[in-house]
Every structure is written in C-alpha cells, then in structure tokens.
Image (cartoon, rainbow, N blue to C red):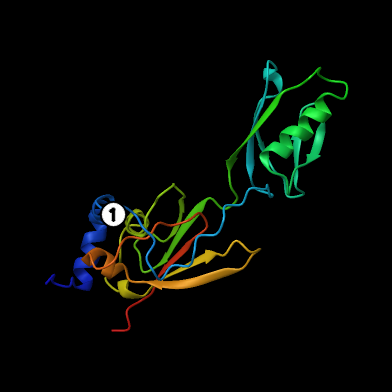
Amino acid sequence: MARRLSRREFARLGALGALVWVGAGCRPAVVETAPPRPAPRETLAPGDEIDVRVFDEKRFEGAYEVDADGTIDFPFIGAIAVAGMNAQQVADALEERLADGYLQHPQVTVTIKARENSEVSVLGQVNRPGSLPFQERITLVQAVSAAGGLTAYAAPRRVKITRRTGEGDQTRTFEVSLAAIIDGAAEDLTLQAGDIVFIPESRL
C-alpha cells in the first residue's frame, strides 16, 4: 500500500518539478468528478484572432484580431462585422466584399488562430500564483508545477477548478484531489482554456 506524502513532501515535489514528470508518465484523462467537456465554440467573438489567406494576393494576408465591437479592420474594405460567424462565413463575406470593385473571383481561406481567454490560472497555495499560457493537453499536475509547486500550507485533496459551461458566461466549480492523482489513485485531469485552478489552504 502506497505511503501518503506529507505536506512538506508535496511542496518539495512541486518545487523540484517532479509533478511534470508524474504528469508526463500517464495519459491525461478527465476524472469522473469533472463536468462534461462543452462543445468547442465555432463562431467568433471579440478577442479571437483569425488568419486570412487570399489566393495570389499577398497584400491581404495576415492575422486579424476581432475588436470589442465584433469587427476586424481589413485592407481597402475597412471594418467588417465577423462576430457570430464561423471561419467559412467570414471567408464568404470577405470574398463578396473583395469582389465588389477590388478583385476578380477572389478565393479566401480563413483559419481561427486563437481563442479569447487562452490561459489557465493557478491560484491559492502555490509558489507562483497567476496565469499560464494555455497549451493543448496540459494537465492539472503540469499546471501546478509550472506555477512553482505547492506551498507547505496547501490542501492538495481539496483543489477546486472553475470552468465555463459553454452557455454564455456561466461557470461550474468542481473539486479534485491532487493528492489522489499523485498517489496513483486517480487519473490526471486535462485542463481547458480559461480554467481557474484554486489550491486552498490546509485547515490544520
């Protein structure tokens, strides 16, 4: 039967970066207590970034950020509303506008490059609390390690994760035992962009 680690051992483990090694050694999976993953958002919103390619027209190509009013500023055309559109709809709109006096038979390709709030926040009893750039398949233990590991006062059995539900601004908070993950009693948790991880202080 595996020995439970003390709070000091947890802190030392995090500081040495051993949490990353543990996380890399197992395939990330959502624990049973996590809410279902919402369907990815396919339409654009302020803060998103798109990459535009126009066939044989380098002057129009580049990255464009969706402004707070839901528009992008496109060469020659000016402001064009894209909020609520998917990539194909934006490409169709740009083709229509470019064909109106600028190009003959324009062929536009649009790719969504970045999403709003592409960070993960790790707060509470970690040595370097704050926000981290989101990476695909980043796990809970990897994020905690990147935040400097646990402090000696952390309560790793009561880690709280706040996540958007995919329904407007609604969020849901659930609890995960980081101690159980490190002990091998539970699988690691794959985080999502915008997740807020809070490590509470021990009651002892």
Residue lying at the far bottom of the rendered structure: 204
- Horizontal and vertical percent position of residue 80: 80, 38
Q: Position of residue 157 (x, y in %)?
A: 31, 74
Residue under the image location 48 percent in, 67 percent down: 35
Q: Nearer the viewer, residue 120 or 170?
A: 170
Q: On screen, 2 above or below 166? A: below
Q: Using residue 194 as the reference point, say whether residue 85 is left or right of it.
A: right
Q: Residue at x 81, y 37 (%)?
A: 79
Measured from the top left, where is residue 38 in percent x and y?
55, 59
Residue depicted at x 68% and y 19%: 55
Question: Element type at marker 1?
Answer: helix
Q: At which x and y percent is residue 113?
A: 58, 39
Q: Assess disc 1: are there few (<14), some (14-19) or many (≥20) residues with their C-alpha within 10 Å of its C-alpha.
A: many
Question: Where is 109 relative to 196, above or below?
Answer: above
93 with respect to 137 (left or right): right
Residue denoted by label 1: 23
